[in-house]
Amino acid sequence: MPDYTLFEAQVSTLTPLHIGSGVELLNQYDYAIYRGQTWRIDHNRLLEAQKIDDPRQLAIISQRPPVELLEASDYRADSPFFRYVLKGVPRATGEGAVLREQIKDVYDRPYLPGSSLKGALRTALAANLWKQHGLQLEVNRLGRNPKFAAQDLERSLLGANPNRDLLRALQVSDSLPLTAGEALMVVNARVINRGGQLASPIEMEAIRPDVTFELTIKVDTALFSAWAKSAGLKFTAESALLGLPALVNKRSLEQARREKAWFERIPNAGRLTSFYDQILKSQLQPNQMLVCLGWGTGWESKTFGTQMFASPQVREALLRQFRMARGRRNAGDPFPLSRRVAAAFQKTANGRTDESPALPLGWVLVQFKAVKGNQSLWR
């Protein structure tokens, strides 16, 4: 039997998932809006089709919004002038309106980076270990840089350096790529506050619900062997990694309970509370994990969460030191004060368009099957 276990995994989106490339696409320059769809422009082919030999004329044309070079007849499925076409349109339709790009490969095929899934699993594992050990946060032990503030705390839970890091034994591949037009949609996201008001519109490409990625997960159990220990390679919490799915699901369900309770106090958020109610009623199998990852999933999913706040004084000191609270907030107010959600639009009888919160972001179901090694692992 090999000294590792290899799983084939399927990651299915339950709600829209956005993992950004860092690129902001501009309306009429990078994409066009036409008949309820968003068309990603292929600049090279569009310019080549102009058949202009004079460099000066080409330079003039290249400064114009590319959408001005398109005809109505160009908007068709087999058009060479578009890289892909997305269902839905951004809320903002003015020239230069921003659409955040989803990460893709060089062929415009969206995929799920293994680092994104592994990062979510790592956070869930560390948060559970923190809770199991009954640790308390000491603000003066944190680093000054917000990005690395908890590095020492994380090392105390998972390992002092990369060689001794528990997650060295967990390897998550990038997924196989999908077709952009079939997997992606345009999502209009909003911040929603405790009064139910929607603010801070953000438009983005995102993976649609009910899309499935395929990837592999490898657990290198050789690192836990007697040979490895004799070589001085000792991990602090190997049993936690070997029981990872149960820990991940425990954290995810706790988060779903908190989110359901938060949205139950929000007007017009019935679709969101219904989603979390379905999550909480789901009968998860031993080979399944509920995970929340990607953009817009909130502070609770990216950190150890409010369990770090040993007291109101610690909470206020942490928020103040790292300037975590945005907007107007009084000392003692709950944190976080708002959530990001995908919004839905609906035409009313008088022709007005109403906008309402529809779904949370980034919830996925991971299903896995051992294909090599210990068939009883993660069962």
Image (cartoon, rainbow, N blue to C red):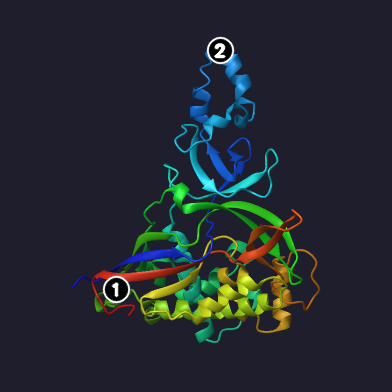
Residue 213: image tag: none
Label 1 or label 2, whichever lies nearer to me, is 2
Amino acid type, residue under disc 1 in the picture: Thr
Q: Is residue 296 above or below residue 94?
A: below
Confirm whether residue 236 shows in the render: no
Circle 1 — which element? helix
Q: In which quarter of the image is the N terminus?
A: bottom left
Query: Does residue 372 appear left or right of residue 162 in this picture?
Result: left
For disc 1, the marked residue is 221
Circle 2 — which element? loop
Q: What residue is at 37 percent from the left and 82 percent from the top?
A: 239
Q: How crowded is mark 2: few (under 14 residues within 10 Å), some or many (20 or more)?
A: few
For disc 2, the marked residue is 54
Confirm whether residue 282 shows in the render: yes
Q: What residue is at 64 percent from the left and 27 percent from the top?
A: 64
Report x, y in % for residue 182.
45, 51
Report x, y in % for residue 56.
60, 15
Amino acid type, residue under disc 2 in the picture: Asp
Rendering quarter of residue 272: bottom right
The residue positioned farthest toward the front in the image shown: 349
Q: In this view, does 169 lie above or below 17?
A: below
Q: Is 97 in front, or is 166? A: 97
Instruction: Say which label, 1 or 2, has the lower sequence index.
Output: 2
Q: In which quarter of the image is the C terminus?
A: bottom left
